[in-house]
Amino acid sequence: MKFFKADWGLLFYANNEEDDFMHTVKNNTKNDNIGYLIGVWGVCLVLVWIGIYKFTPTEAKLIQPLVKNHFAMNWLYDLFPVQTVSNIIGTAEIIVAIGLIVGIKNPKVGFYSGIAAAAIFITTLSFLLTTPNTWKISDGIPVTNFFLVKDILFLAVSISIIERNKPSNK
């Protein structure tokens, strides 16, 4: 089956070869930025809020099992104490949030900040696979720590930021 994306974001079956592609439509109206900006500011709010919280002993202890069991992050505890690791992660989150805000007006900064945000949310989502006892069965349905699952939406916004700010090859 062949599908194409219509201007309003839905996928439709393509009946001929000239419609055999996926395309995005760039709108140049002021109204097309509202959802995008809400997404960017929402991600920034969460990154700053959680980033600041990383500087508390409570959050440092809460993320310890996640970081300790992650193949790409566990080495941090060999070099730094628990609170310092949490502070490093929090600092990175705050810097990325600032970059995303600057990126609203500066596409190059937005592009690289979007990549950094996507890396943060991919890492967070990977905790679902690397942390023991993350998944449980409740009434026959697999459930997890839903605070991690929300990052699917944040990852989507990050990818949107990357796509919107991608340097052109002109």
Image (spheres, rainbow, N blue to C red):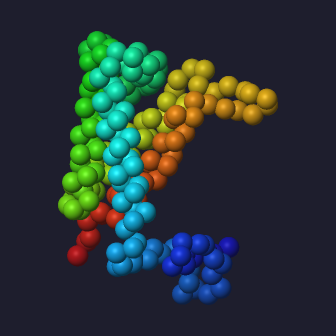
- Tell me where residue 97 sits by quadrant: top left
Q: Nearer the viewer, residue 102 or 118?
A: 102
Measuring from the top left, give residue 168's x and y in whole percent: 26, 70
Measuring from the top left, give residue 157's x and y in whole percent: 42, 54
Where 5 falls versus 86 (above or below)?
A: below
Measuring from the top left, give residue 68's x and y in whole percent: 42, 18
- Tell me where residue 137 sits by quadrant: top right
Q: Nearer the viewer, residue 116 or 44?
A: 44
Which quadrant does the C terminus fall into? bottom left
Q: Nearer the viewer, residue 36 or 25?
A: 36
Measuring from the top left, give residue 12's x and y in whole percent: 63, 77
The reply, left or right, for residue 142 in relation to residue 76 is right
Where 128 falls versus 12 (above or below)?
A: above
The reply, left or right, for residue 19 in relation to residue 143 is left
Which quadrant does the N terminus fall into? bottom right
| Numbered marks: total | 0
Is residue 22 in view?
yes
Which residue does the image show at 33% across and 46% down from the upper left?
A: 44
Which residue does the image show at 49% across and 37% down from the upper left?
A: 125
Which residue does the image show at 51% across and 46% down from the upper left?
A: 152
Residue found at the very far right of the displayed protein = 140
